[in-house]
Image: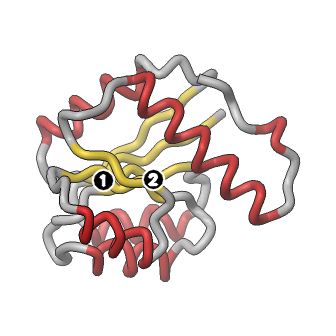
Amino acid sequence: MLTAFIVDDNPGDRALIRRILRDCALDELNIEESWNLEDTVDRLRDGGIDILLLDLNLPGSRGAETVAIVRAVSPDVPIIVVTGSDDQQTASEVVGNGAQGHLVKGRFDSRILGREIVRCLNQNLDSDGLDRTTVPSP
């Protein structure tokens, strides 16, 4: 079972991302959520998260720093930043801090998100030298 972890301080954005995730047609998807960095760090330390969908602006952190903090706690979990910013500099910064992907809120659907999840999981498996057969197809 694939566990996706949505981190966003806006309940409406979390609900929208959750709905889009459910429409991705990924086999056996478990969705967990958090609204702040402190709870996110605690949950990541427990392990078992396969993909992280992370907003950049959370209580306790702003911008690319959010990715750096999460990456330091959980270096192996693929991160897709989901933010309201369409700024190319922001996208470059978050990738430079360890995110595998960047999506702009309101500009993706289940097909795009599903492909991005599979791409990030495959990229992570390639870097670990693991078997790709464990990654679901959207």
Image side of residue 85 versus residue 94, left or right:
left
Tell me which amino acid carries mark 1.
Val
The residue located at (47%, 58%) in the rendering is 79
Question: On the rendered image, what quadrant is the N terminus found in?
Answer: top right
Quarter of the image where one finds residue 47: bottom right
Q: Secondary structure at mark 1?
A: strand
Q: Where does the image place residue 83, in percent across and percent down from the top left?
A: 22, 53
Position of residue 124 measured from the top left corner of the image (x, y, whole percent): 67, 58
The residue indicated by pointer 2 is 52
Q: Residue furthest front?
A: 88
**Side of 128 relative to 136 (left or right):** right
For image coordinates 48% across by 73% down, the residue present is 98
Viewer-closest of 111 and 26: 111
Using a 10 Å C-alpha cutoff, classify the residue at mark 2 as few (fewer than 14 neighbours), some (14 to 19) or many (20 or more).
many
Residue 65 in picture, x, y percent from top left:
28, 80
- Which residue is label 1 attached to? 7
In this view, the residue in front, 24 or 48, is 24
Residue 58 at x, y = what percent? 17, 65
**Secondary structure of residue under mark 2:** strand
Res 41 → quadrant: bottom left
Asked if disc 2 and disc 1 are in contact, CB closer than 8 Å, the reply is yes
